[in-house]
Image (cartoon, coloured by chain):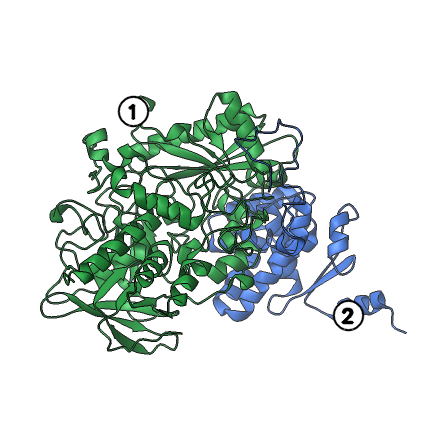
Chain colours: A blue, B green
Amino acid sequence: MLDDDLTRRDFIKTSGTMLIGTLAASSGALSVLAPTTTWALELTKLDADSGKVILQVTRHILPHKTLDDAVYALVVKDLDKAAASDAATAALLQGGVASLNKKAKGDWLALSKEKQFDLVKQMSDTEFFEKIRSTAIVSLYNNEMAWAHFGYEGPSWPKGGYLNRGFQDLDWLPNPPADASPPPA
Amino acid sequence: MTKYALKDDGVVVVIGSGAGGGTLANELCQKGVQVVLLEAGKHTPRESFVNDEWPAFGQLSWLDKRTASGGWRVAKDFPGLPAWICKTVGGSTVHWAGASLRLQPHEFRVRSEYGNIDGANLLDWPLTLKDLEPYYAKAEDKMGVTRTNGIPGLPGCTNFKVMHAGATKLGYKQCHTGRMAINSRPRDGRAGCLQLGFCFQGCKSGAKWSTLYTEIPKAEATGKLDLRPESQVLKIQHDKAGKVSGVLYSDAAGKQHVQKARAVCVAGNSIETPRLLLNSASSMYPDGLANSSGQVGRNYMRHMTGSVYGVFEKPVRMWRGTTMAGIIADESINDPKRGFVGGYEMETLSLGLPFMAAFLDPGAWGEGFTSAMDNYQYMAGMWLVGEDMPQESNRITLHPDEKDQYGLPIPDVAFTDHPNDIAMREHAFKQGSAVYTAAGAKTNYRVPPYPSTHNLGSCRMSARAQDGVCNGFGQSHDVPNLFISDGSQFTTGGAENPTLTIVTLAIRQADYVSQQMNARAI
């Protein structure tokens, strides 16, 4: 019999273009939504090291301290997809990563978070930065894991809306009078 | 389904199936007029709407190439998306929030009321509120507007509770759940509101009025309507006498046809309507159709807008319930002592997490931005919407270089705030923040205007032919059988959400068009 986790680990070990991580124990909501507590992201165009750099750059651009890497990895996934379908985008991203490493005189990821941030900030008017920012502003907040993290409840139609599920559920302010807010039918 | 021949020159062609075109088509059909309704978008049934902001945006929005220019921030942040409107059967009535307010008497005669304002191309409407009152009443009944016709108001959601608490503390007197074309009870074959919270993504329950599932099926039931979705009109044609004779359009397969017409009514929203007239230039009309005044495309208005999001100690969960759940109307008066003419409405608004990220502070990054997003579920939100000044230089033009998929010049939307707009926005931001502070907010965020949803005025009504494009019935001054049938007609914008007035004008125009046909004037 195959152990699912073992298989997954083997797979991860043998793949050169995977981003891997473990969902933080604190984000209970995420471990429910994510398929397993270990997540892996397969890249098609970018190499794994570039993926790691881009993930970390994204964390500097849109820093949510307790938001799991698994959500940031969705941004990397979308950028990888864009790179796979457009050579110019691939070159832009790879060039940006190379440029960060050059500025770091080797390995940008090995720098302290403060030094990493300084170099990202220096690049804030570049196309590389803007490509990551504009992708992240959509991808980072457009998934169920992020919705759970920020408390957003997503689609309501499958649950019948909020008419009988707390649309007036706010008890720390007085209720408006009936002429301003008539009772539900 | 009724089908008319392309050569049938007895039909009235209506271009666009939203609030103006969809309503006009139905009203004409009810009178026995034969109508061909050409809609650029697809037929997107209600069942296919999605409670998910980005996919719904992709499903419903007008995403054909456009450019934005001028001094407004949208030109920088969303250079390819000057307006957030729809390309689908039902037009932007699929996406609208449902607020249905009548214009105020003074808003029809602002040149007389406000006087001459530098840089503003103000003009009185060629009609009064009194002219429109019977038609407003018909529109409210048709749309099932709450707080009219004995229809109870909607119950207020959490976002409204916050607004009401702050408004009361501040001493505002006119705060309630609004006049909404959203059923608070089942009515006219449509369900009551389920408080889904996805009004902008298409109302899946049908509680919100949209021509998609009201006017259009009613028109089809008469046997007089020939609805052709995915039909993009490229050019309006005219005869030697200068009257319009038909339209050239492309079908879904890209095949071009000419539909002959007895009259043509244009309701493509205030960007596509002037664009089509400009793209219809001919040797007889070298500056574009109906453009002897040079006003086609000019005086484009988009309402003074902005939003305030207040952050509270405890969760608000503003997304739970109707997107526009209530209103404060106290600031909609004209009181120049505030430092500007005209007024504005304050209306609750909520954005889902994905759109909050996109619109809170476009282009922003870093901790300032993310700490705001971290507070998402503690936010209450309101939209500020007021009268903006018509300016000749705010206009729709044909792009000098860029072409669309049909090889026609795309529209450029140039807009710059008038100083009056800026002063009004500043006042509205202050008052909006004061409302939330009074309700206990610890922080308020001022959010800049979204891409335009209220597009108005680019083919305006005027008493004199040299001041505008059409008369008080939307009939073009230059070409008697060519009508403007959408918000492009607005001489000025008023403070109110425009849909109710667009529908009202369409009902009135239908009376006029059929009278003109009966009298053989057109």
Q: What amino acid is labelled 2 in the image?
A: Phe
Residue B183 makes an appearance in the image:
yes
- The residue labelled by disc 1 is B336
- Image quarter where the N terminus of chain B lies is bottom left
Query: What is the chain letter for disc 2?
Result: A
Q: Establish if A127 lies above or below B154.
A: below
Residue A155 makes an appearance in the image:
no
What residue is shown at x 23% (from left), y 45% (from top)?
Answer: B393
The front one of A185 and B246 is A185
Pointers 1 and 2 within a single chain: no
Query: What is the chain letter for disc 1?
Result: B
Q: Is residue B423 left or right of residue B357?
A: left
The front one of B434 and B68 is B434
Marks 1 and 2 close (CB-CB < 8 Å): no
Position of residue B8 measured from the top left corner of the image (x, y, whole percent): 24, 75
Q: Is residue A170 left or right of residue B428?
A: right
- Image quarter where the C terminus of chain B lies is bottom left
Q: Secondary structure at mark 1?
A: helix
Circle 1: is it few (<14), some (14-19), or many (20+) Cα within 10 Å? few
Mark pair 1, 2: CA separation: 71 Å
> How many numbered marks have been drawn onto this rendered protein structure?
2
Q: What amino acid is labelled 1 in the image?
A: Pro
Give the label, 1 or 2, closer to the camera.
Answer: 1
Q: Is residue B190 left or right of residue B407?
A: right
- Quadrant assignment, res B374: top right
What residue is shown at x 74% (from left), y 49% (from top)?
Answer: A29
Position of residue A104 measured from the top left corner of the image (x, y, whole percent): 60, 50
Circle 2: is it few (<14), some (14-19), or many (20+) Cα within 10 Å? few
- The residue labelled by disc 2 is A11
What residue is shown at x 90% (from left), y 74% (from top)?
Answer: A1
Position of residue B125 measured from the top left corner of the image (x, y, whole percent): 22, 41
